[in-house]
């Protein structure tokens, strides 16, 4: 049996009929006791952690609460996975890597500068160093999807009337493809860290133009430099290029980022 913690954007798209989804209202992953009761009752073979505080500004302004969910929560799950011999699949993030035009590999040391990325990194480091090896840490980047959701980049862009977007190259992950990447890795019983993104790169400017073309024709798209866009945000946003060679070496062939973006835009609900 697979148990998925969290019921947000990723959870909704990866869950299958046979999965048990535990929403926040049923369990707070920072509460070890309530997690323990769920493990005792369900004895899951695979535990997928999608639960997280994902808003950068919220994390920066609520450091302790964010730490409890994004660091302590996955650590609690790891400890229980060890006791119940379950596989832990923890969703991390590509944004632990900050660097224009630099390729980041699974072995690249993270460089984090805001609270959200610090606390995600600490969870990853704990899991990697603890000694229970049956885990997968999956790192997607800038998630897009054909299903509208406040944390879907396409939806986020469509909330604006005008947008300033830069032309720095970035990896992206289509959530519908992420589901296949994850299932592929679980099926092969892979362990360790995997970057999970589509092949090739796109820029926020291209995504904004796509949103204008297919979702919101009245959106006004301005080209801006990366530095200019940073001034518009209270907390630093990164540009990240992930290598997905390790994923591909397991036999998974991802769609290209351009193909996935076009598909998500043209089938967007
Ligand atoms: N969105 C992206 O582009 C992106 C990119 C890279 C990585 N990721 C990672 O992917 C994972 C899933 O993200 P997502 O986009 O699906 O996020 P999401 O839509 O914000 O969903 C997060 C879920 O976690 C739940 N949650 C929050 N605090 C909790 C707690 N203490 N205990 C239990 N559940 C809690 C939320 O419930 P409530 O809303 O009811 O609190 C919500 O159901 C996260 O780890 C995120 O860091 C996301």
Image (cartoon, rainbow, N blue to C red):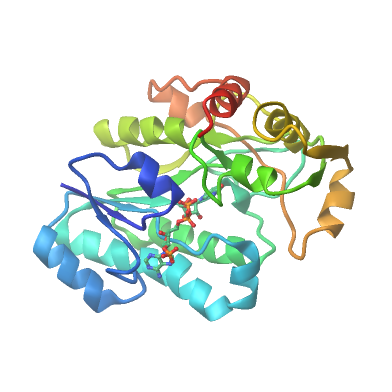
Q: Quadrant of residue 22?
A: bottom left
Numbered marks: total: 0
Q: Quadrant of residue 158?
A: top right
Is residue 75 found left or right of 124 in the rendered image?
left
Is residue 180 found left or right of 172 in the rendered image?
left
Is residue 121 found left or right of 227 in the rendered image?
left
Return the x and y of residue 258 as percentages of the image width and height: 63, 22
- Going 23% across and 59% down the picture, which residue do you hit? 81
**Extreme residue in the front direction:** 218
Q: Is residue 229 visible from the viewing direction of this image?
A: yes
Q: Nearer the viewer, residue 209 or 161?
A: 161
Q: Is residue 137 visible from the viewing direction of this image?
A: no
Return the x and y of residue 42 as percentages of the image width and height: 12, 58
- Going 23% across and 78% down the picture, which residue do you hit? 33
Return the x and y of residue 212 as percentages of the image width and height: 73, 32
Return the x and y of residue 211 as percentages of the image width and height: 68, 33
Q: Nearer the viewer, residue 222 or 234?
A: 222
Q: Quadrant of residue 247?
A: top left
Instruction: Give above or below for 35 relative to 175.
Output: below
Is residue 119 found left or right of 43 in the rendered image?
right
- Going 69% across and 44% down the picture, which residue do you hit? 157
């Amino acid at each position: 049996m697979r148990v998925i913690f969290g019921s947000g954007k990723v959870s909704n798209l990866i869950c299958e009929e046979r999965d048990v989804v535990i929403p926040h209202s049923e369990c707070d992953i920072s509460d070890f006791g309530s997690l323990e009761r769920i493990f005792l009752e369900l004895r899951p073979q695979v535990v997928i952690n999608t639960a997280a505080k994902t808003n950068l500004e919220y994390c920066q302004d609520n450091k302790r609460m964010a730490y409890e969910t994004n660091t302590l929560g996955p650590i609690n799950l790891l400890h229980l996975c060890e006791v119940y011999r379950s596989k832990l699949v923890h969703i991390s993030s590509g944004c632990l890597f900050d660097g224009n035009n630099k390729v980041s590999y699974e072995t690249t040391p993270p460089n984090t500068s805001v609270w959200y990325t610090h606390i995600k990194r600490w969870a990853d480091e704990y899991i990697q160093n603890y000694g229970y090896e049956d885990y997968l840490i999956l790192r997607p980047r800038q998630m897009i999807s054909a299903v509208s959701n406040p944390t879907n980049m396409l939806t986020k862009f469509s909330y604006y009337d005008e947008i300033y977007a830069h032309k720095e190259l970035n990896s992206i992950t289509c959530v519908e493809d992420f589901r296949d990447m994850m299932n592929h890795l679980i099926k092969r019983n892979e362990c360790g860290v995997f970057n999970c993104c589509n092949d090739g790169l796109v820029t926020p400017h291209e995504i904004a133009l796509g949103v204008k073309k297919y979702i919101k024709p009245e959106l006004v798209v301005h080209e801006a430099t990366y530095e200019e866009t940073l001034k518009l945000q209270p907390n630093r946003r990164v540009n990240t290029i992930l290598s997905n060679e390790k994923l591909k070496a397991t036999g998974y062939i991802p769609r290209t980022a351009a193909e996935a973006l076009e598909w998500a835009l043209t089938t967007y609900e």
